[in-house]
Image: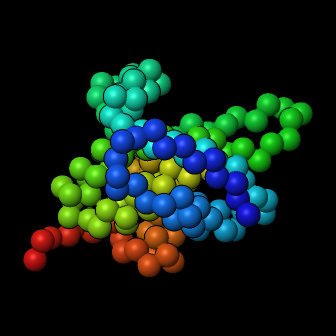
Amino acid sequence: MNKLDFQIVSKSNSIPAPHQFQSWVDAVLKDESEDSEITIRIVDEAEMIQFNEQYRHKKGSTNILSFPFDVPEGIESNLLGDLLLCAGVVEKESQQQNKILEHHWAHMVVHGVLHLLGYNHVEDDEAEEMEGLEIRILNIIKIKNPYEETSNT
């Protein structure tokens, strides 16, 4: 089983249970040959702003940051890295995009774990590949395509 170090330092009361995060991480890593270790830290906007500015040199908050662990040569480690999620941003996006909050959390976790595995979305072809993987993984856990437009009707 993949090891998940779960840290909640957010004041939000709408964060899914740790076992849900575990199931989303496991859905992404189900085809990996070895169990992996990931830290997920749920923060409020003040901490996310600080990390976003320090590591991405971008002002303001964001929904998720991924910090892949670069294993030094000669060292064995199952640590994939850290995910930093901002509860407030995830909640706002869910409302703005008319998405079920739990589904948006799942999408953010799937997206972040794919980054830890080396996937990216800088170039169009990379984005297409990564989005396709996200859609397939989310479909397996019964969550519809997060890139389709939704409406309130």
Q: Position of residue 35 (x, y in %)?
A: 76, 58
Name the foreground residue: 74 vs 65: 65
Q: Is residue 39 above or below residue 142?
A: above
Outermost residue toward the right in this view:
74
- Up the image or down, 151 lies above or below 118; here it is below
Closer to the camera, 150 or 84? 84
Direction from residue 109 to residue 89 in the image, left or right: left
> Which corner quadrant of the image does residue 22 belong to?
bottom right
Establish if 137 lies above or below 46. below
Counting labels gives: 0
Q: Is residue 106 left or right of residue 49?
A: right
Q: Quadrant of the C terminus?
A: bottom left
Q: Estimate the x, y position of residue 98 in percent, counting from the top left.
A: 20, 64
Q: Is residue 130 visible?
A: no
Give the residue at x 29% y 29%: 60
Image position, residue 24 (x, y; %): 54, 64
Residue at image point 49% right, 75% down: 141
- Give the left or right position of residue 150, taking residue 142 as reference: left
- Residue 125 is situated, as x and y percent measured from the top left of the image, at 45, 54
Q: Residue at x 28, y 52 (%)?
A: 91
The colouring scheme, among rainbow, by chain, secondary structure or one colour, is rainbow
Give the quadrant of the N terminus: bottom right
User: Residue pushed farthest left?
Assistant: 153
Where residue 61 sits, quadrant-wise, is: top left
On the question of residue 67 being in view, the answer is yes
